[in-house]
Image (cartoon, rainbow, N blue to C red):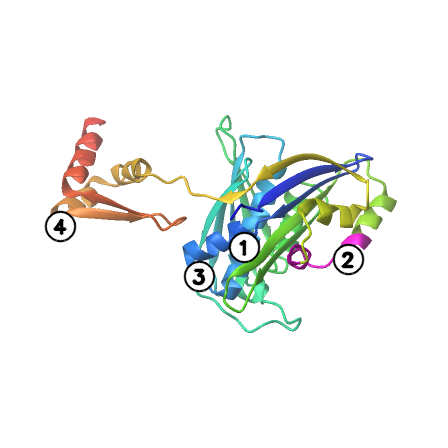
Amino acid sequence: MGSTDYLVKAISQDGQFRAYAVNSTQLVQHAHQVHDTWNTATAAFGRSLIGTLLLATSGLDKTQAMTVKIQGNGPVGAIVCDGRADGVVKGYLQNPHVSLPENSKGKLDVSGAVGKQGALTVTKLSPDDKEPYSGEVNLVSGELGDDFTYYLAQSEQIPSSVGLSVFVNEKDDVTAAGGFLIQVLPGASDENVQKVIDSLKDLPLVSQLLRDGNTPEQILTKIFGDGQLKFLETMPVSYRCDCSKERFARAIEGLPKDQLETLINEDHHAEAVCRFCKKKYEFSEDELKQLLAKKEAQK
């Protein structure tokens, strides 16, 4: 089955708004399968991945990578997502097995899973940056769309609106997931900003729009109106991990000498499991001895 997952970037014809929308249904379904998430955790994790994706692809720096950490006081615990400007995202969550009763609106209780108290932290790194930039805000609702919106307003000083939506069916599969990010550019008139706010109030959930067959382009057109946008770029998005045995070998080599010797003399092997994709890497006693020798040689 061909992927329908992609992100679209646009600017309003009057140059007053930047707009992004994404269909990430297969991406979130893949993340659910990798981490064996239960329905409420799937929605919370999915929204976090979509929010990270929208932030990572909205910068002008094509080499930028970022890590978003959401640490609320709810049962899912910490959620960590890595996103890149090229539309690749990955993540993990502390407790994937969270299923809560639906909230008063008959929806998955994401804020109950995430918690209403805690923090959202974004750490950005470009290859030429020596020091990563980090911004942190308190959670405002735990629904995550509001929290990403608040982060952009506080940390980046960009008035924005972020919509994140994941639909999970009775079998716990993700049948629709996506989102949008609208940014107000300098010089936008109050009247036009109000129009967009009113339009967003009437907008159905992104997951509902996707289930009704709308594309990311059509979702943005519903917000701004026919002919009001200039579409700039379309890019595929995916959940993908770039782990490797070499990377884990470097981590093992970085362990204190006594820990490495314990692995060699008592355990006689080591197993590393990637938190992002659950892939396992085995290191034999001989491989561990080589890593220790390499460590010693570098002194």
Q: CA distance from mark 3 to mark 2?
A: 31 Å
Front in this rendered view, residue 175 or 56: 175
Callout 3 amino acid? Pro
Residue on which the image places disc 2 = 201
Q: Which quarter of the figure is the C terminus placed in?
A: top left
Q: CA distance from mark 3 to mark 4?
A: 32 Å
* Image height of 163 relative to 59, above or below: below
Callout 1 amino acid? Gly
Residues at discs 3 and 4 in contact (Cβ within 8 Å):
no
Residue on which the image places disc 3 = 96
Badge nearest the viewer, 2 or 4:
2
Which circle's residue, 2 or 1, is located before the other in the chain?
1
Magenta segment range? 198-211
Give the image quarter of residue 289: top left
Give the image quarter of residue 96: bottom left
Q: CA distance from mark 2 to mark 1?
A: 22 Å
Residue 37 place in picture, x, y as percent: 45, 61
Residue on which the image places disc 1 = 46
The question of residue 201 being in magenta is answered with: yes
Residue 229 place in picture, x, y as percent: 77, 39
Q: CA distance from mark 1 to mark 4?
A: 41 Å
Residue on which the image places disc 4 = 266
Callout 2 amino acid? Lys
The question of residue 257 being in magenta is answered with: no
Which circle's residue, 3 or 4, is located before the other in the chain?
3
Q: CA distance from mark 2 to mark 4?
A: 62 Å
Residues at discs 2 and 4 in contact (Cβ within 8 Å):
no
Label 3 environment density (alpha carbons within 10 Å; few <14, some 14–19, many ≥20): many
Q: Residue at x 14, y 47 (%)?
A: 268
